[in-house]
Amino acid sequence: MRITVGVDGSDSARDAVRWAAREASRRNLPLHLIHVLEVPPAYGPEPVVHLELYLDAAREDGRRVLNEAAAIARSVAGEVRVTSGVADGPAAKTLIDASAASRLLVLGSRGIGGFVGLLLGSVAAAVALHAQCPVIVLHSADATPVPMTGPILVGVDGSEASDDAVEFAFEMASQHDAPLIALHTWLDVSMAGAWTALPMSVDWEAVE
């Protein structure tokens, strides 16, 4: 198993590499850097440039981005074994496939190229929903808050997915020697009554 990072050359991705490299060092895992080359469909009477020439140039730029990311990873965790690769295909599917061999999949919250709009877009939603390992979306102007400080917060609702989240939260809390807070929420609204509020005579203490 390994920790995998999506890399696109953005500042956010560089921060994700720094965080992931330190996490890989802490867990004694290798680090894999992946750059996704997703070519959007283009329509027109004649191409501006031959597709193969464009792909060759894009792959070469991807290798440059990966080399830069590898140097960043080694600068913060020189003992970690780093591998990298350029992958062709849809960003979401490529990252989901990569998650099968990963203990963690780490992404920056803002990106360029194939990761534009990652935080709020369909790529993030698809990866978070279908990945086969925990997904970390790093929200940080830089990577200085590493190791993390403060408690780890996990939402709990009794579902199977929640059980998985609790297990991962305990693991992270143990790894980072951090306190763990479990949070469960509830609504004072009856869904069966078309959003009609429950009667005021309800014993709210009993409901809670």
Image (cartoon, grey):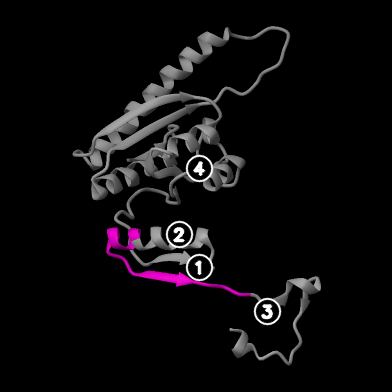
- Determine the residue positioned at 27% across, 43% down: 29
Front-most of residues 34 and 93: 93
Q: Which residue is mark 4?
A: 110
At label 2, the amino acid type is Ala
Question: The N terminus lies in which quarter of the figure?
Answer: top left
At label 3, the amino acid type is Asp
Marked residue nearer the N-terminal end (1 or 2):
1
3 and 4 marks in contact (CB < 8 Å)? no
| Residue placed furthest toward the left | 79
Q: Is-magenta flag for residue 196?
A: no
Q: Is label 4 or label 2 in front?
A: 2
1 and 2 marks in contact (CB < 8 Å)? yes
Is residue 104 positioned above or below 164 on the image? Answer: above
2 and 3 marks in contact (CB < 8 Å)? no
Res 14 seen here: no
- The numbered mark at residue 156 is 1
Q: Which residue is mark 2?
A: 165
Is residue 139 positioned above or below 38 on the image? Answer: below
Report which quarter residue 166 is drawn in: bottom left
Relative image position of residue 163 (x, y in whole percent): 46, 62
Is residue 139 positioned above or below 50 on the image? Answer: below
Is residue 135 positioned above or below 101 on the image? Answer: below
Relative image position of residue 207 (x, y in whole percent): 62, 85
Q: Is residue 195 left or right of residue 69?
A: right
The CA span between labels 1 and 4 is 28 Å
- Determine the residue positioned at 55% across, 47% down: 129
The CA span between labels 4 and 2 is 24 Å
Q: Which residue is mark 3?
A: 188
Asked which secondary structure carries label 2, the reply is helix
10 Å neighbourhood of mark 2: few (<14), some, or many (≥20)? some
10 Å neighbourhood of mark 4: few (<14), some, or many (≥20)? many
Report which quarter residue 39 is drawn in: top right
